[in-house]
Image (spheres, rainbow, N blue to C red):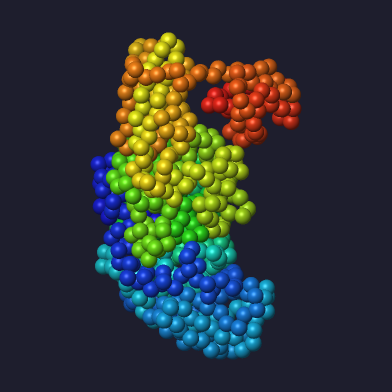
Amino acid sequence: MKKIFILGMSLLAFSNLFAQQNNVEMKGLMAKEMKSFAQKMAVGNINPNTSNYDLQYQRMDVTLDPAVYNISGSVTSHFKPLQAMNSIYFDLANALSVFSVQFHGQNLAFQQLTTKEIKIDFATALPANTLDSLTINYAGAPPTTYNSFSTTLQSGIPLLSTLNEPYGAQDWFPTKQSLNDKIERFDIKVTTPAQYNVASNGKLMSETILPSGQKRTFWRTMYPTAAYLIALGITNYTKLTDTMGSPPFPFINYVYPSTTGNATSMANIEWTKTVMNTFETYFGLYPFRNEKYGHMEFQFGGGMEHQTMSSMGGWSKQLVAHELAHQWFGDKVTCGAWNDIWLNEGFATFGEHVANEKLIMSNADFLTYLQGEKDYITSATGGSVYVADSNLNSVNAIFNGRLSYSKGGYVLRMIKWILGDTVFYQALKDYHTRPALAYNYVRTSDLNASLLQSTGKDFTEFFNDWIYGQGYPSYTIKWKQVGNFITFKASQTQSNPSVNFYEMPLPIKVIGTSGQVAFLALNNTFNNQYFTEAVTFPVASVQFNYDYQIIEKNSTVAQDATLSTAETVKEVFSIYPNPARNELFVSGLKRETDYQIYSADGRLVKQGKTDKKIEISFLTKGVFFLKIANSDFKFVKE
C-alpha cells in the first residue's frame, strides 16, 4: 500500500514530503478501531481461536448498492479441521448481524462475541483432516471507524470501495484474518443495480442481468490469497480491456468515466505495460498470469495492492510501479506478521527504485531521489524497521513511511550493493519461487535463509543491524597515497546504541589528477580499520558513498599526510593455472581464507576455505569467477 495525498507534484521536489505523508491521513482513521482487535491477537497477529483449521475456500454471495451503506448476503467457507473440533471461530465485526449458520442443511447455534468473532458450535465434534463447509448468512452496516468499507460519490455517482489492510476484512465479511492461512480459492458474487460495474480479484467469470433487473457479477481467483487482499470496487466504471506480457495475459482497468479524458492518467495506465516488462526482467514472471493484472479506481489518495487488481487513487508512475511491485512482494509472498511489513512495503519501495532508475529518471535525478530517501531515513536516530509488538495497535507505526517504506527499500539497495546486481536479482527471483514460500506467508528469517541458500552469504548480522536495530552509521574516512598504493582508515560512530557496529563494504571512488577513476569496496568489519589498495595513478580526490549505495549521515572524507601505513601490509594474490582443469591455486595467502566461486550468470557454485588449493574438477567447462580476500579473479575451467 502506498498513500500519497499531494498528487500531481514533482517527486523530486517533494520526495521528503511524500515520504512523511505516507499512510498517515487515511490510516489515522483506523487507530481506534484497531486497538480492541490488536488486543485479542497474540504476538505475530494470529488469533488463537482460528488456528485449529485450514480455511481452503470461501464463496461470497452478497447484495450491494453503492448508494446505500449496507451489505447483505452469505459467505460459505470450506475448511479442514487440524484436530477434532466442537466449535469453530471466524473473525467478524459486531456491527454485522448474523441471521443463521447453515451446516449440512441444519441451523447451528452461534454467538457473536465482543472480540469481533463469531463462535459456531457443532452438534457433534468434527474429525480432523476431513474437509467440511458451512454458510454464514448476515447483513448490516459495516463499522465506519476503520474505513475498510466506504461509500462516497465520484462525479456525482455513488462509489463503494473496500480496503482491508491491515485488520479490516472482518468488517464486511466473516473470514480468517490471521496471517497464517491463505485462502486457496475465493469466489466473489455481487448483486448490484444494473447501471454499476463491479471490479474485484481474479478472473471475471460472468455478468448476468437477473429477472429483477439487477446485475450479478461473478469473479473468481484460484491463487492463494490473504483475507486483507480481497477487495471490491463498485460504480459506473469504464472498463478498459487489453493484454500485456509475452505470452500475453489480460490487462484490465476499471476507471471513472472522467479519467478516460485525462491524457496523463491514461498514458500512465498504459505505461503499466512498460514497467511490467521491466519487473519481469528483474523480479521474474508476473505471479498471477493465469488471471490478470489491472487497476480499479477508488476514493483514497495513493493505492492498495489488491491481488491481481490494485486500487488506485492516483496515476503517477511511481504509484503504478509501487503497487505493481507488491504483486510479487506482498501478494505472492506476504508478510507473516505485521511486524515484518517491510517485506511488503520495503520491497514495493525498492520497486520504485527500479522503476525510477531504469525507466523514469535520468542518472542525476535518480541520485537526487536516493539522496532524498537517505536524508529522510536519517532524519531521526531511533526506530527499527521491524515493528515492535507494542506498536501493533498503531496503524501509523506499522505503515511508517520512514522505516517500513523508505528504510526497508534502502536495505534492499544495500543488499544489492553487497551482492552485486546479477547475484542480487537472481536471489530475489529465488526468494519468491521457493516451494515453501511461493504464495505463502514469509518472515524476515525466511528471506535470510533464502539469501543464504542463493548466495552462500549469511545476512543474520546485517538484519540484526538494519532491520531489528535502529539508527545509522557516520563515517570518518582518511586516506594517504604512497607510490602506487593508497591507504585508508575507516572510523565509524553509531546514532543509536542498539547497534554497536555496522559491518558494511564501503563504496569508495578514487579520482586521479588526470581524470582517472577507480572504484573500490572496502570490507569494513571493525572500527578504525585500515585498508591498502593498489592505485596506479596520482590521486586528486576520494569520494565516499558516491552513488548512495548505503545509508549513512554526516560522513567525511579527508586526505591525511600523517596517516600511518605501518599497520597494514598489502597482500597481493594471484591464481594459477588459468585455464585450469582439476585444481586452482591461490598464491599470496597467509592464512586460511573464505572463498566463493560464481558461474558466469552469477550463481554461487562453490564456497569454502583454503590456504592455497581449490578443487574444481566438478565444474563444467566455461568461465567462472573466484572471490577471495576482497579480490576477484576470472578463470576458465577446461
> In the image, 54: left or right of 507?
right
**Picture layout, residue 504 above or below residue 264:** above
Q: Residue at x 69, y 24 (%)?
A: 613
Looking at this rendering, what residue extends furthest in the top direction? 483
Residue at point 52%, 45% (across, down): 460
Q: Nearer the viewer, residue 278 or 576?
A: 576
Residue at the spot 71% in from the left edge and 27% down from the top edge: 616
Q: In the rendered view of the protein, which quadrant contains the N terminus?
A: bottom left
Q: Nearer the viewer, residue 38 or 622?
A: 38
Return the residue nearer the eye: 412 or 184: 412
| Residue 375 shows in this picture | yes
Residue 395: where, in percent of width, then height?
A: 36, 62
Indicate the position of residue 308 as horizontal and vertical percent values: 48, 57
Expressed as whole percent of the image width and height from the top left, the position of residue 470 reads: 38, 48
- For the C terminus, which image quadrant? top right
Q: Is 481 rendered above or below residue 197?
A: above
Q: Position of residue 233 (x, y in %)?
A: 39, 66
Q: In which quadrant of the rendered view does residue 539 lie?
A: top left
Residue at image location 41% in from the left, 58% down from the top = 388
